[in-house]
Amino acid sequence: MDLNALTEQEWEELFGEPDDHDGEAARRKAPLWGKLVVAIVAAAMVLSAVPGLVTWVRDIGAIRDPIDIVAHAEGYVASSEFGWLVSEVQIAALGEPNIAAFVMRNPADGVIILDDRPWQRGDLDETMAHEIGHLLDFAVYPGGQGNLRGGIGSEAWAECAAVSAGERRLDGEGDDDEYRCRPSELAVFEAEMAAATTICRPWGTPECRER
């Protein structure tokens, strides 16, 4: 806040009426308590803008156009080892900040639905790897039968698929978040995938591929 830019009325509201004999000097040299008030007010103004500032910084370089989002996602599908499990990529307003994308299991159709939010490319690639991980789950364990995912949870499986694809880092063994991939879970994922020598896609045009 520029003290010299204050009007007489603003100055009086903040610091009281200036000395009649040295009004200009009083304006230029604020008392210590007045400077503290100004500093507090300025800090409050900055802090109040932080959420918007964080959002602005986060969205720099983001993909916003739905056509471009789908095009980037389809490019990821084309480069993915298991992209052939994806039948289509769609975009919709999901309306939940914590839901970035989803796939259907019952019945599984291979369609990945992405939220229409602005996407950073890295975040979009990680999300696509996660959703392809779900489709891989559906293909390796059709009908949800058998020793599902070697005993690890559905979200942990999909997160480990993203780690295996190089789109995500490993979490610590102590991490108990649902969306995690710990070293022990990655070991299970890799062992299950090593045993799955043939993977079949039952949706769309059914297809099986040897690994």
Image: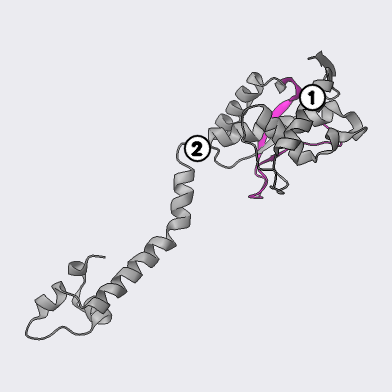
Q: Which residue was labeled with disc 1?
A: 193
Answer left or right for 167 relative to 161: left
Report the span colored magenta: 84-108
Residue at x 31% of width, y 69% of height: 39
Residue density around tag 1, few if under 14, some if 14–19, many if 20 or more, within 10 Å: some
Q: Are marks 1 and 2 in contact (CB under 8 Å)?
A: no
Image quadrant holding the C terminus, namely top right
Q: Report if residue 4 lies within the magenta region.
A: no
Image quadrant holding the N terminus, namely bottom left
Q: Which residue was labeled with disc 2?
A: 62
Magenta span: chief secondary structure: loop
Residue type, mark 2 in image: Ala
* Residue 54, position as x, y percentages in the image: 47, 51
Q: Nearer the viewer, residue 146 or 92?
A: 146
Circle 2 — which element? loop
Q: Report if residue 101 lies within the magenta region.
A: yes
Answer left or right for 127 relative to 122: right
Q: CA distance from mark 1 to mark 2?
A: 33 Å
Q: Is residue 129 visible?
A: no
Q: Is residue 75 visible?
A: yes
Residue density around tag 2, few if under 14, some if 14–19, many if 20 or more, within 10 Å: some
Circle 1 — which element? helix
Of badges 1 and 2, the one in the foreground is: 1
Residue at x 60% of width, y 34% of height: 124
Rendering quarter of residue 201: top right
Answer left or right for 107 relative to 101: right
Q: Is residue 120 above or below residue 15?
A: above
* Residue 90, position as x, y percentages in the image: 68, 33
- Label 1 or label 2, whichever comes before in sequence order: 2
Q: How is the image coloured?
A: one colour
Rendering quarter of residue 77: top right
Residue at x 58% of width, y 32% of height: 69
